Amino acid sequence: MAVPLVILYAIAAGCCYYALTIRPSGIWDKDAYGAITLSCFCTIAVSAVALLITVVPASVRRAMGRAWLVPPLVLAAVAAFRWALGG
């Protein structure tokens, strides 16, 4: 289960990175604001899928530990904060 989770975390981190690095040229730059919103939404959606995989009660879940919950929660929180500020 670690390999799919790491892939999902990498996708979410990439989307979050794009959301944080996109800078609108001005208030009129609707395309940049749309890209920020889309990147934040994708980060939150992929993080939610990763959280669901991690939380599902299975024998693998007991072996993985709670540390696997931290990356998607942090990425989703950063994306939600960016979305609220400028998305």
Image (cartoon, rainbow, N blue to C red):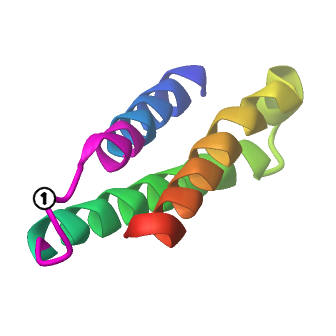
Left or right placement of residue 34 versus residue 80 in this view: left
Q: Is residue 66 magenta?
A: no
Dot 1 amino acid type: Ser
The residue that appears at 58% across and 49% down in the rendered structure is: 78
Q: Looking at this rendering, what residue extends furthest in the front direction?
A: 26
Is residue 10 visible to the viewer in this orientation of the structure? yes
Quadrant of the image for the N terminus? top right
- Lateral position of residue 75 relative to residue 10, left or right: right
Q: Is residue 34 above or below residue 73?
A: below
Viewer-side residue, 64 vs 73? 73
Residue 17 sits above or below residue 83 on the image: above
Q: Which residue does the image show at 75% across and 35% down from the upper left?
A: 70
Above or below, 7 relative to 55: above
The reply to whether the magenta stretch includes residue 28 is yes
Q: Residue at x 23, y 50 (%)?
A: 23
Q: Quadrant of residue 69?
A: top right
Magenta extent: 16-29
Secondary structure type for disc 1: loop
Quarter of the picture holding the C terminus: bottom left
Q: Is residue 80 left or right of residue 14?
A: right
Classify residue 11 by image quadrant: top left
Q: How many marks?
A: 1
Q: Please identify the quarter of the rendering in which residue 64 is found.
A: top right
Q: Which residue is identified by label 1? A: 25
Tell me where residue 86 appears, x and y as whole percent: 40, 67
Q: Is any part of residue 53 visible from this angle?
A: no
